[in-house]
Image (cartoon, grey):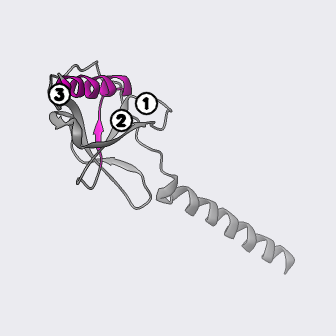
Amino acid sequence: MGKLLRTIGGLFVIGGILVGFTYPQFKDLPIIKKMPTYRGNSFPSFSEFRVQDVEFDKFGVLMFKGHEPYELLINVDYIERVHRYEDAKKTDYSCLLYIRDYETPLLARMEYKEVYSAIRKASEAKVK
């Protein structure tokens, strides 16, 4: 009887481990490849960014909506937050741009310093 209980207990533990590894919250975040430097145009209040549409599942895992990055002209006055995004390999080749009145953030396929520079140029041109 004791041997049977240990076998059942062992199967229960192994089953729990297998379920835990297949559960989506343990899924790795996507690996984001480094893209060449992008220097978009800047105008007063507007700057051009290389972005990609993303969405988050119910566990907070980032998934690509669009297949390819594209260029987008954004009014920098509507950017509320820029979050340096770190992927599963702990590299930060992209940033999340939180735009006012836009539900999901855009993934800027540019490094933080490039995004910062683009926002700064557009803001300075507005003041002149």
Write the residue at 24% across / 21% down. Answer: 38
Picture coordinates of residue 128, whole percent (x, y) = 17, 21
On screen, residue 6 above or below 65? below
Viewer-side label of 2, 3: 3
Query: CB of mark 1 within 8 Å of CB of mark 3?
Result: no
Where residue 20 sits, quadrant-wise, is bottom right
Location of the N terminus by quadrant is bottom right
Residue under label 2, please give it. 95
* Residue 68, quarter of the rendered image: top left
Q: Which of marks 2 and 3 is nearer the N terminus?
A: 2
Residue at 17% from the left image edge and 37% from the top image edge: 74
User: Which amino acid type is marked by label 3?
Assistant: Lys
Whether residue 15 sits left or right of residue 36 in the image: it is: right
Queried whether the magenta region covers residue 109, the answer comes back as yes
Image location (x, y in percent) of residue 14: 66, 62
User: From this viewpoint, which residue is outermost toward the bottom?
Assistant: 1
- Crowding at dot 1, Cα within 10 Å, few <14 / some 14-19 / many 20+, comes out as some
In the rendered structure, are the residues bearing label 2 and label 1 in contact, judged by CB atoms less than 8 Å apart?
yes
Contact (Cβ within 8 Å) of mark 2 with mark 3: no
For label 3, the residue is: 126
In magenta, the rendered stretch is 105-127
Which mark is first along the chain, 3 or 1?
1
User: Mark 2: which amino acid?
Assistant: Cys
Which mark is in front, 1 or 3?
Answer: 3
Q: Where is residue 75 in the image (x, y as percent from the top left)?
A: 17, 37
Q: Is mark 2 on a helix, strand or loop?
A: strand
Task: Report the magenta stretch's main SS.
Answer: helix
Residue 92: mark: 1
